[in-house]
Image (cartoon, helix red, strand yellow):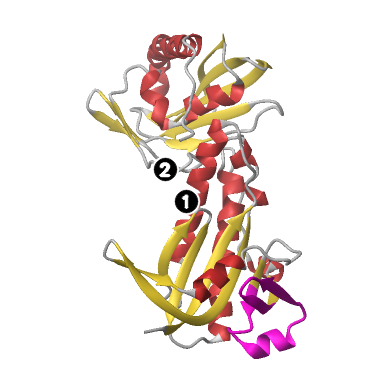
């Protein structure tokens, strides 16, 4: 027996076909976060039928309310672009995906009609000609990147009175639809404050070395916790949120001699051709804050100059331990650099493009 249902597809676009594997991996994580965000901002009781690459296929049995649908579109659109705006400030990676997040766009395909259900592995899935129609409409002649597309079956009055109407001709017949630009909603986006530079005042220790690895590849090894135990000496375990691209404000846990430290990802201003990754903690005894920065400068396409800088703000009398702390870092940091050099010289690649 057929049911009348609203069919609702938010579709993300804007990522190009990246060939560099870091960008592929990061674009996958970013799209995953955005799809979860759209699901979390479902406010009208939509049922998720399928995750389809960069899109979500929702349905809801029952009558439609065009005003309610527009509110749903607005809610998801604002959540989507608030995320992009915040990510522009928080990102630390300069790969193709992370650098072009601002290019991402969101469109909505909205249809209404009879559907039936097919059982697949004890799961009921919407099925029928209207499911085909709403998916065919993902390919259309709308000339703008961000819009809500309403078929005539959703609301005849909306289509008849719309400023922009089109007709799509398919093998099963013609579909009349209207589309509305979503760009005006951007004026309602909340203000997102830039990440402040907050570098402790004491430059405790710094050293540098040349490493035979392209700058983006080395940056990925340093900033991606998947690779941390390959080169960071003295760390027994790293706990972090997987399937998320590391960014400013993220925390992870390092277990060192059975003691837990919870650094926060930070960055700081750098020269135009440099990449900077940093971590900050307030858990080192006798310090208010300790920041470690990895400053990467490309020497050529295959070689990178890595400079590691350690800055500290001391608690009262903590300055008395400055020499001892410097001695410890002078031992550990070169060991880490040595491991990075060995890793690079071994031909290691962050090949995670499955």
> Is residue 315 in view from this perspective?
no
Quadrant in the picture for the N terminus:
bottom left
**Where 68 sits versus 217, above or below?**
below
The residue drawn where x is 73% and y is 66% is: 141
In the image, residue 29 lies at what x, y percent? 48, 45
Question: What segment carries the magenta color?
Answer: 149-177
> Is residue 218 in view from this perspective?
yes
Q: Which residue does the numbered mark 1 point to in the structure image?
A: 32
Q: How crowded is mark 1: few (under 14 residues within 10 Å), some or many (20 or more)?
A: some
Circle number at residue 56:
none
Q: Which residue does the numbered mark 2 point to in the structure image?
A: 243
Magenta span includes 41:
no
In the image, residue 79 lies at what x, y percent? 54, 63
Quadrant in the picture for the C terminus:
top left
**Where 260 sits versus 119, above or below?**
above
The residue closer to the viewer here, 289 or 25, is 25
- The mark that comes first in sequence, 1 or 2, is 1
The residue closer to the viewer here, 91 or 326, is 91
The residue closer to the viewer here, 221 or 238, is 221
Q: In which quarter of the image is residue 210?
A: top right
The residue drawn where x is 58% and y is 57% is: 12
Q: Element under label 1?
A: helix
Magenta span includes 167:
yes
Locate residue 73 relative to residue 332 in the image: left or right: right
């Amino acid at each position: 027996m057929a049911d009348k249902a609203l069919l609702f597809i938010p579709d993300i676009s804007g990522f190009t076909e990246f060939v560099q594997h870091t960008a592929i991996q990061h674009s996958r994580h970013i799209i995953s976060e955005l799809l979860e965000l759209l699901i979390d901002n479902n406010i009208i009781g939509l049922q998720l039928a399928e995750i389809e690459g960069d899109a979500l296929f929702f349905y809801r049995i029952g009558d439609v309310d065009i005003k309610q649908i527009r509110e749903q579109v607005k809610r998801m659109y604002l959540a989507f672009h608030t995320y992009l705006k915040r990510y522009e400030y928080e990102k630390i990676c300069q790969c193709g995906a992370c650098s072009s997040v601002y290019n991402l766009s969101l469109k909505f395909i909205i249809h209404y009609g009879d559907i039936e259900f097919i059982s697949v592995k004890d799961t009921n899935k919407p099925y029928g000609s209207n499911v085909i129609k709403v998916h065919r409409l993902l390919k259309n002649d709308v000339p703008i990147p961000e819009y809500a597309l309403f078929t005539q079956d959703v609301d005849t009055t909306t289509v008849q009175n719309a400023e922009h109407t089109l007709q799509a001709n398919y093998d099963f017949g013609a579909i009349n639809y209207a589309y509305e630009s979503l760009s005006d909603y951007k004026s309602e986006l909340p203000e997102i404050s830039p990440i402040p530079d907050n570098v402790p005042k004491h430059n405790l220790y710094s050293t540098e070395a040349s490493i035979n690895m392209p700058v983006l590849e080395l940056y990925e090894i340093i900033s991606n916790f998947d690779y941390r135990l390959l080169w960071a000496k003295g760390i027994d375990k790293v706990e972090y949120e997987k399937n998320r691209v590391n960014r400013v404000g993220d925390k992870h846990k390092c277990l060192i001699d059975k003691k837990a430290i919870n650094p926060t990802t930070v960055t700081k201003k750098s020269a135009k051709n440099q990449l900077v990754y940093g971590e900050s903690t307030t858990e080192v005894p006798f310090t208010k804050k300790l920041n470690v920065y990895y400053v990467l400068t490309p020497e050529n396409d295959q070689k990178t100059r890595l400079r590691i800088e350690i800055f500290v703000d001391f608690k009262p009398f903590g300055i008395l331990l400055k020499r001892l702390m410097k001695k410890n870092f002078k031992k550990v940091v070169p060991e880490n650099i040595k491991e990075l050099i060995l890793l690079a010289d071994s031909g290691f690649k962050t090949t995670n493009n499955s």
